Amino acid sequence: MTKLNRREMGNSSEEDLAHRVLKDIKAPSDLGLLRCVQCGLCTSMCPASRHSEYDAREIIKRVLDNDESIIDDEIIWNCFYCYTCHSVCPVGNSVCEVNQILREMAIQKDVGKKQIESFMSFADSYLAEGLGIIPEEYHGQLKIDYGKHWENLQEQLQDIREDLGLESMYLLPEAKESVDKTLEAIGFKKRVQEIKDVRNRK
Amino acid sequence: MSEKNRIGVFLCHCGGNISDNVDLDYIEERLSENDEICSIKHHENLCSLEGRNIIKDQILRQDLDRVVISACSKITHGATFQKYIKPLNPYLFEMPNVREQCSWVTENKQESTDKALSLINSAVESVKYNEPLKKIPTSVKNSVLVIGAGISGITTANSLAKQGMEVTLIEKRPAVGGAMVQVGKVFTPDKMSEDCAACLLNPVIDEMVHNDNITLLTNTVLEKSTRNSGNFDVILRKKPDYVNPDKCTSCGKCTESCPTFAPDEWNEGLNDRKAIYKPFPQAVPSTYTLDDESCVKCGACLNVCPTNAINLDAIDEIISLTVGSVVIASGHQRFDTSKRPEYGHPFYEDVLSQMQLARLMGVNGPTHGHLQVPSTGKVPRRVVMIQCVGSRDQMPEGHKYCSKVCCMVALKNANLIHSHYPDTEVIICYTDIRTLGVYEKYYKYVQNNGIKFVRGRPGEIAREDDHMVVRVEDTLNRDKIEIPTDLVVLSAALESSEGTIEAAKTLGVPLTEDKFVKEKHPKMQPVSTDIEGIFVCGTAQGPKDITDSIIQANTAATKISELVNGGLEVEPFIATINVKKCILCGNCIENCRYQALTMYHNSIRVGPIACTGCGDCIVTCPEEAISIQGQSDEKLRASIAGLLKDKKEDEQVIIAFLDDIGNVSANNMGINRVDCPSSIRIINVPFINRVKYSHIKYALTHGADGVFLGEYPDTPKHNEIRENVNIMKKHLEEDGINPERLLIHSVFIPYFRGLANQFKEFDEELQILSK
C-alpha cells in the first residue's frame, strides 16, 4: 500500500516552487508554467526523454506539485538544452528553461555544485586567458570523437592562422586586465571558487 | 441658468460595495449645503424595486426637476434608472460612478469620500444642463442580405422569409449547404447514433428554394457596402453564368467531354473533378458550373451541350441592392494542417483531416463510402486520431481557443469506422475530452464500443516501412510510446473563413483577436455587432456545432424582426445642424467616419442610426453650426467646475477625459480592484476631439493640477488627435501654463492595469511638478 498523501488546506502560497521559478530572473515574463495541462507533447519530442529516464512533462508536474526533491534529483541534469520542448509547447511553457532555473537552485546547494564542478577547468581557462578555450583535459576525448584531422588542426593552429594573415587570437594585456576586473566585479571568481570548494567538502 | 433647479440626489450603498469605503453621511451633510439640492436619500440597493419607489416618491413629493443617482456604472445600470425616474423625462438624470471609479479603486476611506463628493458635485452641476430629449424613432427597411448559405444562413433566411421579409441569400460557392452538406454523418444530441446530414439538411434547403421571399444567388460575394441612414446600399458581384440555369438540364455531357482536371473541393482534394462540373449529385442549384480558373476554354463542352446552355464569353454581374439589415453567416474554414508539418500533412498521403475522412466514409465520396488507406487502397488495420491540431495552441499560426466540436467529430468518425470495420482498431490521442451536456453519454457509448484512448498530445509522426508511427507519451502512466498505424486522422481547428474576414472588412464590422466577427457583447448580445443593423450567426462568430448554429441563426432572425416590426429607437445624442448657419461646405460629410452625414436637397442630413454623437464634426465646421443634442459645451464645462468645487487645499486633482473605450477600461480597473490614485476624476466623453482647448484651459486655471486624455488609438482619427494635442500644448505655453500638465495616452479595454499605471505615473509627476 502506498501512503495516502493528505493535502492540508490553507497552504497555497506565492512561495511555492512554481512561483519561485516564475519569479526567477531567468524566467521569461510570459512563461506558461502554470498553464501546463500535462499534455505530454514535450516528452513525445524530447531526445533526453527518449533515451533516458528523464521525462520533460514530469519535471513540470513535480514543480507544480511543489515537489522540492526535484532540486536534488540528478534527473534535471539529463536535459541538454536542445530547446525542442520550448519550441513545441502549445501553452508557451519551456521545460528547458525551467530546468535551467532548477539547476541554479541546485547550484546554490552543494548538490548542484557537484554536478558542475568537473567543468571548472573551462572557468580556469577563461580566467587565465579571458577566452573560452577548450581545456587540455578534454583534448583526449575530442581526438577520439573528431579524429586525426582535429588533432592536426590543434597542433598547427598557430601556423594556419599566420598563413591566413590572422593576428594572435589571445587578448592584448590591457583587454585581459579589463576582463579580469569584470570577472572579479561580477562575482565570477568567487562563484568559481565556491564551486571548487565543494570538492574539499566531499 | 437664472432659475433655481430642484435636484434630488440618491446615494446607493450597493450592499456595502460603496458605503463600506465612502462616508455617505458626511457626503449627505456636505450636499445639504447646496440650496439647489432639495432631496437626499440613501438606500441599500437603489436598483431594487424599493429603490424605484423611493426615487419616484421623492420626485413627486419634492417636485424635483433633475436627478443624480450616485451609484455604479451608467453602462450597466443607466437604462434601469432611466426608467426609475419616470415621470421625469428619461434624460434629466446623471449617474456619477462612485463604485467602479471610486470606492473599488481607492484604498483610503477619507480620500475615497472626498473623491465621491467631487464626482457627485460634478454630476449635480452638469445635470443642470441636461435637456428633456426623446429617443429618435426610425424605421428599418423590410429587406435583408444574408451572407453565406450554410446551415446558419439558410436557417436565418427561412425564418426571416416566413416573417414576411425579403431576403437575398448569397453564397460564394456554386452550391449551398456549407460544411454540413460535406460531413456526411452528424451526431445528434441525446441519441446514440450518427444521422445522415443530407437527410436533415435537404428539407431545410427545399424550404429555402421554394420560398418566394428568398432570392438565392450562388457564386456571389459582397463587394461593397455603404451606410445610407438606417439602410445599407450594397453591391454584389456574381461570377459569370457560363452555364445558363434556365437551359441546363443537368445531363452531364459537358463534364464527360471536358479534358481539364482540377482538385475536387467537395471531396477535400482527395480526387479530381473536371473544369465544368456539378459539385456533387445532390447540389442545389442543380445547374452545372464552370470553374474559370482551371477552364482552358477549348470549347469541347459547347459542342456536346444539347440545349446550347453554355456561353464561355459570359461576364460577371454587378447587382446593387438596398437592404435594412445584414446577417453575416459566412462560416468557418478548417486549419491548414500543413502548418504543422510534424504531423506529416501533406508529405504523407495517409495522413488525413477529419473532413477528408468524412468524405472517404461518405457514400457520395471518392470511394463511395469505402474506407481505404490512400497509398494502398486497403482497409486500415489501425487508425490513430490526433486531437487539437491548431486548437488550444498558442504557437504561431495556431489558435488559443478550443474548437469546441472536434471531440465529438472524432468520436463520431471513430464510431463510424468501428461499426463498418469492426476489425479496424481506432485510437484517439487527446489532451482533454470535452463532451459537454448530453454528449457525454455518446462518449461513454463510444468507449463501450471499444474505441481506445491515449491521454497525450503526440509530437510527431514518422514513416516506417509500410506504415507510420505516432510518437506520444501516455501521460497517465508515463509511457513513452510509438503507435504503428496505417492511417492518421488530424482533428484540425475551426477557424474564421476568408469569406468571413472579407465580409467583416467590407461591412466595417470589427473582428475578435481570433479573427471571428466580434459580437456587441460576447455574453449578453451574441448576435448583434457594433454596427446597428448588422448581425452575425453560426461559425462566423466562433466555433460551434450545428445545433448551436441553428439556435444563433434563429436568434439573428428574431433580432431583425424586432428592428423591422418594433422599429428602432436610437439615443438622441446625435449631431444637429443649425441650417441658418450652415453654408453647405461639406467638410463635416467628408470628415465623418461613420458615414452619418449626407447632402440631401441643399441641406445636410444626419443619419440617426449611423451617427454615434462623437462630436468630431463640431471642430470641422467653419461656421460653428453643429452641436450634439444634450452634450453642450456648457454642460462639459459644468462637469469640470463641479469636480473642482470642493477641492481641498492639499488635494491633487487630475481630470481624466476618457473616451468610451477608456471609460470601460477604467470600469474594469474597478471590477478588478486595481488601485487608482484618488486624484483621478473621470469625465466620459464620446470622443477625445470633443474636448476643446477652452475646456482644458478652464480646468487648469480653476484648480485642476493636470488633465489626462485617454484615447482609443485604433481609429482613423488617431494622428489628427495627437497633432491637435500638440497644438493645444503650444497654446498652453502661450497662455503661461506648463504644457506638461496635459497628457494624452492610449487606452484599451483589456489593459486597465496599464491605464492604472499611467494614472499613477502622471499623479507622481504632477506632485513633483507642483513642488
Image (tube, grey):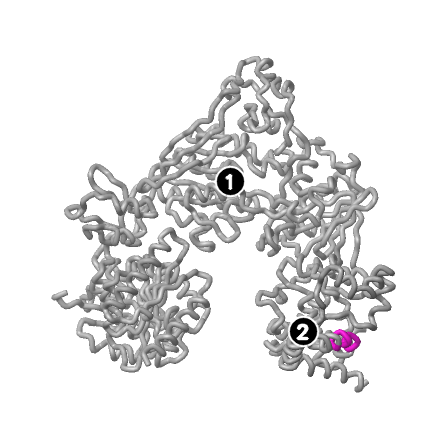
**Residue range corresponding to the magenta coloring:** A117-124
**Residue A59 sits in quarter:** bottom right
Q: Identify residue for label 1.
A: B499
Work out which quarter of the rendered image holds the N terminus of chain B and state it.
bottom left
Q: Name the spot of residue B711 as percent of width and height, x first.
A: 37, 60
At numbered mark 1, what does the secondary structure look like: helix, strand or loop?
A: helix
Residue depicted at 83% across the width and 66% down the height = A155
Q: Nearer the viewer, mark 1 or mark 2?
A: 2
Callout 2 amino acid: Leu
Work out which quarter of the rendered image holds the C terminus of chain B and state it.
bottom left
Q: Identify residue for label 2.
A: A172
Asked if the stretch drawn in magenta spans residue B109, the answer is no
At numbered mark 2, what does the secondary structure look like: helix, strand or loop?
A: loop
Looking at the image, which is closer to me, B167 or B479?
B479
**Residue B281 sits in quarter:** top right
For residue B236, side relative to residue A167 (left or right):
left
Residue depicted at 66% across the width and 47% down the height = B491
Asked if the stretch drawn in magenta spans residue A122, the answer is yes
Looking at the image, which is closer to me, A13 or B747?
B747
Chain letter of the residue beneath label 1 in the structure image: B
Chain letter of the residue beneath label 2 in the structure image: A
For residue B368, side relative to residue A138 (left or right):
left
Q: Name the spot of residue B541 as percent of width and height, x first.
A: 50, 47
Cα separation between marks 1 and 2: 65 Å
